[in-house]
Image (cartoon, helix red, strand yellow):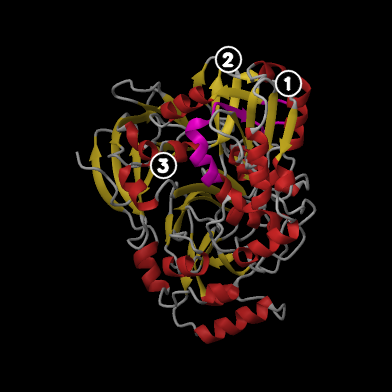
Amino acid sequence: MRRPNYDKHPFVKSGAADECAVGWVAIAAALPRLGVLCVECYPGADVDAIAEALCAHLDPRQVLDMRKLYRSAEELRAMFAPHLSEDRVFGQMNDVTIADYFAPDALQAARQTVAAASPDRLTLVIGTGASLVTGTDATVMYADMARWEIQLRFRRGELGNLGLRNEASDFSEKYKCGYFLEWRAADRLKRQLWDRVDLFLDTNRRDRPKLVSGTRMRSSLAQVGQRPFRVVPYFDPGPWGGHWMEEVCDLPRDKPNHAWCFDCVPEENSLLLGFGGERFEIPSIDLVFSHPIELLGRGVYERFGAEFPIRFDLLDTMGGGNLSLQVHPSTAYVQHQFGIPYTQDESYYLLDAGEDAVVYLGFRDGIEPEAMVRDLHAAEQGIEPFPADHYVQKWPAKPHDHFLIPAGTIHCSGKDSMVLEISATPYIFTFKLWDWGRLGMDGRPRPIHLEHGLRNLRWERTSAWTEENLVNRIVPLAHGDGWRTERTGLHELEFIEVHRTWFTRAVSFSTEGTLNVINLVQGEEAIIASPTNAFAPVTLHYAETMIVPAAMGAWTIRPASSQPGPECGVVVARVRGTEEPG
């Protein structure tokens, strides 16, 4: 096992320590004592704790708590029911806004109250939607929070969804409501408000709130969009999880296993900005919203809008079990059924593998689809286990194999594998067909979506087609002194292109005006640099994922050691066909 050097808390240097106020005393000193203070809160921010601290330090004349203006929980549930369905996982994308959560008469009355407030005393308006009732003369403070922290609070029962009073509900119910409703609505409001925010409040740690000015935040993110950076990874157990990451990523042994590492999912990861020794945490999606063209490139932005379309994560089954047998929907299906513009095409890149590791991919030749459907239904009903080996082709898996998985292809990684999953971003739209008869981490059967899955299986993808199209489709592209580059995927049906470069000395790249996402798949560490010194050199460790913004242009990578040694390897993913000429 290699020496652990994986950085679990990467940050981007952004300013001096005195530009970041820490603790409520310092924060209060930066806030106004007169006029209107609007504290717009991302859903999940602890409104009670923030209000208590601000009242203690600022002594406002009046406090308007936006939670008192919500429609009733019953009215909200009835309004949202068509978007959420009865399914445990899936809902429908929609155009719900934060304003829809409030009774219109209550909003109008609140606007009148704020407009009539005395400018000689402080009026505090706080909560999600506070900016809906305050005027342009208000001081706006945005209390932000990363979605991973929100999910942890959901799990601990500390937090429910806006207005629904469902703190004690099942995690999956709260996550689904967040994913399909309140996060989308809150993001729409955040984007509208972004340029007029005066102050940003980091609320991820209740015991250590932090404040930076809006001007400093916006300039910091502008700088991030011009240099390579990593988001903050998070790790999670799963029913099939293994133990490879515990060693390589130096994780605490405080969970039964570690199944996932989400190392590049900007919707849910956070971004750490360094101010001296302080780390200011924001959702990394804020960068996507505020600097989409610099980050994504014009071609990606015109195709996807302000969304980050490439996802990298790690799947650890070393000493664990098989992933669920699954299939992803076609683009047409996911658009029609769920309102999602594109689907989760993906691939498995093997970082490591045990001697008997396999990947299930495609159907065996000569199977009878009708018989397989009957056996899947029997397994779903608990009559007998599904004989996956009879129907699904197993491929031996070894380090650096690359298995391509366009939508419609039945697949799963087997036990004793360490997978770098390279995929499109809509990550909850997986239709499980069979989960090996096991329970989830919550002690309940994991959701099976057999009917959805059966409608999307491409039965013609049998062994010969799969081998020819999806297994290690390596194409040499270029070579030079101490390096060589090859195409490893993805399939022509998928919009992501992946190249792999092996190198023993510095090799040059260009973003070609489009987003690059990279991972060091071999070698202890490598150095990413600018040939024009546009940014300070950055170290990339083994298995780490780094985002290379489109605006960066030229960049180089070399082994960290100046001494001769084994080859390093890096995979580079980008959206096919979005490069800008010359």
Q: In this view, does 346 lie above or below 21?
A: below
Note whether residue 464 is visible. yes
Q: Is residue 545 above or below residue 555?
A: below
Which percent across, then down, holds residue 145?
A: 62, 37
The quarter of the picture where residue 252 lies is top right
Residue 199 lies within the magenta run: yes
Q: Which callout, 3 or 2, points to the residue nearer the camera?
A: 2
**Identity of the residue drawn at 69% across and 49% down:** 162
Indicate which disc, 3 or 2, sits on the residue closer to the N terminus: 2
**Identity of the residue drawn at 34% across and 37% down:** 550
Note whether residue 315 is visible. no
Q: Specify the farthest residue to the left.
A: 582
How far apart are the two marked residues, 2 and 1, measured between alpha carbons? 24 Å
Residue under pointer 2: 17
Give the structural element (helix, strand or loop) at label 3: strand
Tell which of 573 and 270 is nearer to you: 270
How far apart are the two marked residues, 3 and 2, measured between alpha carbons? 30 Å
Range of magenta residues: 187-209
Indicate the amino acid at tag 2.
Answer: Ala
The quarter of the picture where residue 510 lies is top left
Q: Residues within 10 Å of mark 2 (few under 14, many from 20)?
A: some
Which percent across, then down, holds residue 232?
A: 56, 36
Residue under pointer 1: 58
Q: In this view, does 345 lie to the left or right of 147?
A: left
- Residue 517: which numbered mark, if any? 3
